[in-house]
Amino acid sequence: MNDFGPQQRYKSEGSAPDHDIVLKGRKILEISGVKEVESFDSREILLETVMGYLAVRGKELYMKNLNVENGLASIEGKVDDLIYVDEHGHGKPKGFIGKLFK
């Protein structure tokens, strides 16, 4: 079950898809505009979204629901941080996770 509204997430042809984040009580995180899950464990989940890479950090995190086709993800656990990492240049940065913890 999700509260993302209509499954169609695109405003109109040629426009960027929506990207929304809803955090409920630091325990339930719902994200739209998800393109891919890069990595995950119980302390960090790294997502590629339409607005860039998003790192979700916390404790006992797990992916409750994932629908990449519709760009939706639901994460449960204790959320401590939500961090966008902007890239410079093309492609994913090398040592991406290492750069997050510098």
Image (cartoon, helix red, strand yellow):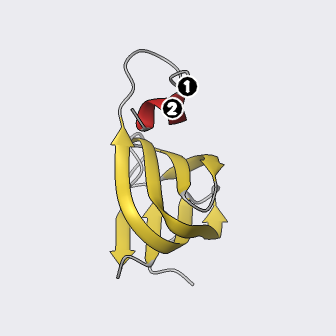
What kind of element bears circle 1?
loop
Image mark count: 2
The residue labelled by disc 2 is 98
Point out residue 30 in the picture as x, y percentages from the top left corner: 46, 70
Residue 62 shown left or right of residue 11 in the figure: right
> Callout 1, which amino acid?
Gly
Which of the two residues, 92 or 4, is positioned nearer the viewer here?
Answer: 92
Residue visible at 43% across and 38% down in the picture: 101
Residue 18, placed above or below residue 97: below
- In the picture as drawn, the residue positioned furthest to the front comes out as 102
Q: Residues within 10 Å of mark 1 (few under 14, many from 20)?
A: few
Q: Secondary structure at mark 2?
A: helix
Q: Which of these two is toward me, 55 or 31?
A: 55
Q: Residue at x 42, y 50 (%)?
A: 17
* x 55%, y 25%: residue: 95
Disc 2 and disc 1 in contact, CB within 8 angstroms: yes
Could you classify mark 2 by the number of other residues whose Cα lies within 10 Å: few (under 14), some (14-19), or many (20 or more)? few
Image location (x, y in percent) of residue 55:
45, 49
Mark linked to residue 95: 1
Decide which of 7, 90 is in the foreground and name it. Answer: 90
Compute the Cα span from label 2 to label 1.
5 Å
Q: Is residue 47 left or right of residue 20?
A: right
Percent coordinates x, y for residue 77 in the rendering = 51, 74
**Residue 6 seen from this side:** no
- What residue sits 50% from the left and 23% below the top? 93
From the image, which quarter does the N terminus lie in? bottom right
Q: Amino acid at mark 2?
A: Gly
Name the residue at the top extreme.
Answer: 89
Task: Name which quarter of the figure residue 63 lies in.
Answer: bottom right
Q: Position of residue 60 (x, y in %)?
A: 57, 70
- Does 27 sit above or below residue 75? below
